[in-house]
Image (cartoon, rainbow, N blue to C red):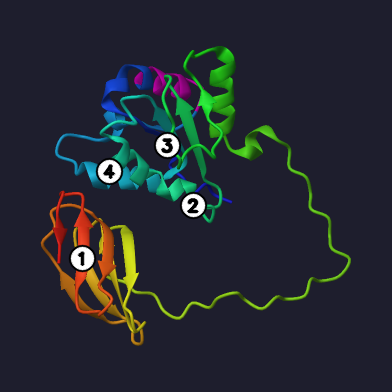
């Protein structure tokens, strides 16, 4: 089966940690991994948010480099970028917190085992390298045992009714109307869309935000939509 990922590892970090992360990226690349590192991928004139989204989508593992600088003002951006990798439905992906310096971990990260690279020893690098590699690269495949009899087909837990297609970027947020007949969505294409759940048609596209729409809500009476964006604004 062809590998659907272009990169083996995506390095998320704060700019203040750039020298250490650059050295780490070079070591990982020297070890044979395909590394997404912003200096190597993002070119002058590129849309930075879009480039990061494409890199995350194309990477098998995300290494989140943690330090006091990363957990400061930049944490909201780093936290948003980890959503894809902390979703257990993303089969084949791996989320790896990497501790660069002593810092207090947010509640969202305490449940995950981190790689301790406060001192970049050979053992710490080997642990990181093993976590970033495909499991099939280090462990021999074991043929599955054939069942004695065909398993019974279970009833599906859910059925796909329709796809709502129209956004030109990732959908970061959704809200369902109080009566359950329509839904609104916020996207990295800077728009909010209103969808009819019965027909799947887009009722309206709302413009005005200058950055990704990462949070959305509907008032209890169903008459207003509130959207929050990376442009530091809330619109009604």
Name the residue rendered at 51%, 37% in the picture. Answer: 110
Dot 2: what SS? loop
Between the C-alphas of marks 4 and 2, the distance is: 21 Å
Task: Using a 10 Å C-alpha cutoff, classify the residue at mark 2 as few (fewer than 14 neighbours), some (14 to 19) or many (20 or more).
Answer: few
Closer to the chain start, of discs 4 and 2, is 4
In this image, 220 relative to 112: left or right?
Answer: left
- Horizontal side of residue 22 vs 49, given as left or right: right
**Which residue position holds label 3?**
106
Label 4 with label 2: CB-CB less than 8 Å: no
Residue 229: within the magenta? no
Residue 10 x/y as whole percent:
41, 36
Q: Magenta stretch?
A: 22-32
Quarter that holds the C terminus: bottom left
Does the magenta stretch mainly form a helix, a strand or a loop?
A: helix
First of labels 3, 4 by sequence position? 4
Q: Nearer the viewer, residue 121 or 223?
A: 223
Residue under the point 53% across and 19% down: 125
CA distance for labels 4 and 1? 27 Å
Q: Which residue is mark 1?
A: 226
- Residue at 25%, 47% (x, y): give it: 50
Q: Earlier in the sequence, mark 1 or mark 3?
A: 3
């Amino acid at each position: 089966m062809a590998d659907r990922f272009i990169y083996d590892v995506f390095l998320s970090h704060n700019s203040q940690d750039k020298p250490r992360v650059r050295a780490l990226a070079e070591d990982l690349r020297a070890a044979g991994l395909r590394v997404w590192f912003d200096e190597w991928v993002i070119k002058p004139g590129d849309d930075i948010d879009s480039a990061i989204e494409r890199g995350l989508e194309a990477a098998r593992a995300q290494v989140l480099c943690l330090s006091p600088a990363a957990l400061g003002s930049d944490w909201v951006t780093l936290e948003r970028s980890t959503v894809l990798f902390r979703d257990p439905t993303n089969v084949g992906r791996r989320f790896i917190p990497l501790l660069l310096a002593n810092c207090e971990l947010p509640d969202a990260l305490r449940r995950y085992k981190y790689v301790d690279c406060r001192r970049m020893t050979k053992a710490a690098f080997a642990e990181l390298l093993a976590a970033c590699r495909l499991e099939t690269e280090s462990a021999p495949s074991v043929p599955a045992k054939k069942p004695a009899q065909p398993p019974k087909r279970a009833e599906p837990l859910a059925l796909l009714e329709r796809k709502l297609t129209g956004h030109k970027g990732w959908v970061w947020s959704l809200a369902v109307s109080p009566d359950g007949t329509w839904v609104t969505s916020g996207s990295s294409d800077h728009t909010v869309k209103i969808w009819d759940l019965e027909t799947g048609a887009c009722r309206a596209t709302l413009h005005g935000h200058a950055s990704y729409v990462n949070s959305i809500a509907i008032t209890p009476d169903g008459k207003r939509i509130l959207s929050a964006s990376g442009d530091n604004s809330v619109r009604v």
